[in-house]
Amino acid sequence: MDWLRDELIRSHDPVMIFVHQLLDEKGSVYVKNAELVRKLLEDSGKVLAVFQGHHHPGQYNKINDIHYYTLKAMVEGSGKENNFYAVVDLQQDKIVIQGYRKAVSHELTY
C-alpha cells in the first residue's frame, strides 16, 4: 500500500492500474483488502481504469469514477474460437478496448 501510494503521488499523469486479482468487489476471487486499495486509488484522483483478471468470465464495473474492466481468461478450451484478447487505446477523453475473438469491446469515458 505504501509503494502504491508513493507511485500515485509521484505521477503527474493519469494512471491505469493492471492487477491479476480483482479489486471491484468482495469474495474469494478478489484482493482481500480491495476496499482499502480502491479508496487509495480514488483518493489519488489520478486513476482512470483498473484492468484485472483472475475471474475467467470477465466483467465490468464503474465505482466512484474508476472503470474496472476484468479481462476474460485468455484461453478457455482449445482452438482459436476459445481465445480472448484485446487492444487498449488511450485517447484524449476515453479508453477504447477493442476485443477480439470472445473478448468484450468497451468504451470507457472519463
Image: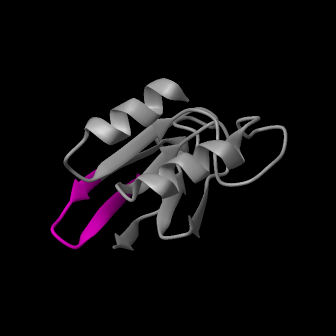
Q: Residue at position x 67%, y 51% from top?
A: 57
Q: Quadrant of residue 99?
A: bottom left
What residue range appears in magenta? Answer: 88-102
State the residue lying farthest toward the right. Answer: 28
Q: Residue at position x 63%, y 37% from top?
A: 76
Q: Position of residue 11 (x, y in %)?
A: 25, 41
Asked if residue 1 lies left or right of residue 110, the reply is right
Q: Position of residue 50 (x, y in %)?
A: 47, 50
Q: Is residue 2 above or below residue 88?
A: above
State the residue lying farthest toward the top. Answer: 3
Res. 102 in view: no
Q: Nearer the viewer, residue 88 or 103?
A: 88
Asked if residue 91 lies left or right of residue 56, the reply is left
Is residue 1 highlighted in magenta?
no
Res. 49 in view: yes
Q: Quadrant of residue 17?
A: top left
Q: Exactly how many numbered labels are in the figure?
A: 0
Q: Residue at position x 38%, y 70% from top?
A: 108
Q: Nearer the viewer, residue 31 or 4?
A: 4
Q: Is residue 55 above or below residue 47?
A: above
Q: Position of residue 13 (x, y in %)?
A: 20, 50
Q: Nearer the viewer, residue 75 or 25?
A: 25
